[in-house]
Image (cartoon, rainbow, N blue to C red):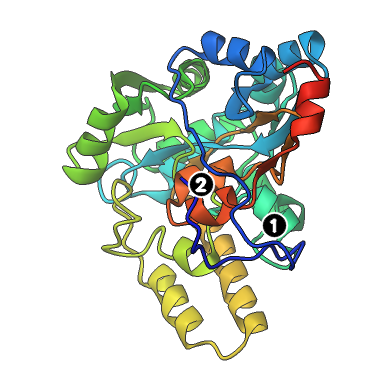
Amino acid sequence: MRNPDYWGYDARYPQNKLPYVDKLKVLIITNEDEALEAMRTGKLDAMDSISWKKAQEMKRTNPEILQIPMPTGATIDPRNDVKPFNDIRVRKALQMAVDLPAISKTLYGGAADPSPSSFSSSAMSTWGKGWGFPYDEWTQDLKDEYAYNPDLAKKLLAEAGYPNGFKTNIVADIAGDRELLKLVKSYFAAVGIDMEIRTLESAAWVAFTQVEKKHDQMAYHSGGSLHRSHEPLRQLTMFQTGSSSNPHMAVSDPVYDSFYARAIAATGLEEVKTIFREANEYVARQHFAIPLVQPMQYSLYQPWFKGYHGQFGAICWSPPSFSFYTSRFWIDGKLKKSMGH
């Protein structure tokens, strides 16, 4: 409900006291098709996390509904503190076993960025100029470590003591992209890695992998530990020893830990940017995690829903942002009525 004593003013229109709307309803519709139908009929003002296929269908049937592409990510997170994944050669082999461009083309119809990412998303590197470590700035030797090369993957496994590969398992959040995971399983099998997929409901997955830390090999859910776009200091805790942001990777690396301390002690923004970039490059070179493709998901919104630019992701990931963003939304009632709603 609207708080008449809310402190904020709209920076775009400084004369306007916020919030604009009297109330906001957040509906949880578990059936995606029902939610999309509610969007088509004007019962919803906006929704997000829509797959590229559903977005294409919506564009065909309802071109008036506006769309915003949102890059997401998927990561395989091996425990860095247990065999065989405590050997960087094994982690490199996992990466080289997977053909990212082929996955983008065959599974996502090209609607996924096949470029690998460090812990900062490619999107962040684009939107926040000077931050992160975008793929086009990687040196060729590093790019080669992320390129599809099954023969070299087998060689690295042999050098690490696994000439015949090994058996492993991955605990997967059932809400993640299981088709992607099945495809990765087939790529791993081609270099001798027999990966069993074990699925858990989302809440159980969090409890098992992040709270109780019972998984003994790898973990997977959409998003994963990479492709992040948090504010820099928060992102620097992603692989920090003992950090709650590093719950199922079990990474403990003194070189990486030093980046956060340096950033806290920095005396200027440019210094923080340099440290942040160094941390991104270090994560990429250490192969703490296995980045997969970055599929596009879409936010949909009605033409009459104003002030919206795809902020729902920030709202969901950061509850304190809820009032900040939602207080700046408003409805163009005349436009909505003219469109028959």
Q: Quadrant of residue 167?
A: top left
| Image position of 161 (left or right of 53) | left
Q: Nearer the viewer, residue 193 or 260?
A: 260
Q: Dot 2: what SS?
A: helix
Q: Residue at coordinates 54% horizontally, 66% vertically from top-left?
A: 232
Estimate how packed mark 2 is, as few (under 14), some (14 to 19) or many (20 or more) residues with alpha carbons within 10 Å: some
Q: Nearer the viewer, residue 334 or 251?
A: 334
Amino acid type for the residue under numbered disc 1:
Ser
Please give the count of numbered marks on the rendered protein.
2
Residue topped by disc 1: 125
Amino acid type for the residue under numbered disc 2:
Ile
User: Could you say where residue 228 lies in the image, as x and y percent from the top left?
Assistant: 54, 50
The answer to whether any part of residue 229 appears in the image is yes
User: Could you say where residue 324 lies in the image, as x and y percent from the top left?
Assistant: 55, 57
- In the figure, 119 relative to 334: above or below? below
Q: Dot 1: what SS?
A: helix
Sequence order check, earlier mark of 2 and 1: 1
| Image position of 268 (left or right of 320) | right
Q: Nearer the viewer, residue 225 or 216?
A: 225
Dividing the image into 4 quarters, which one contains the C terminus? top right
Q: Residue at coordinates 53% horizontally, 37% vertically from top-left?
A: 95
Q: In the rendered structure, find residue 315 and report the number of the disc placed on it.
A: 2
Instruction: Determine whether label 2 and label 1 are within 8 Å by CB.
Output: no
- In the figure, 268 relative to 138: above or below? below
Foreground tag (2 vs 1): 2
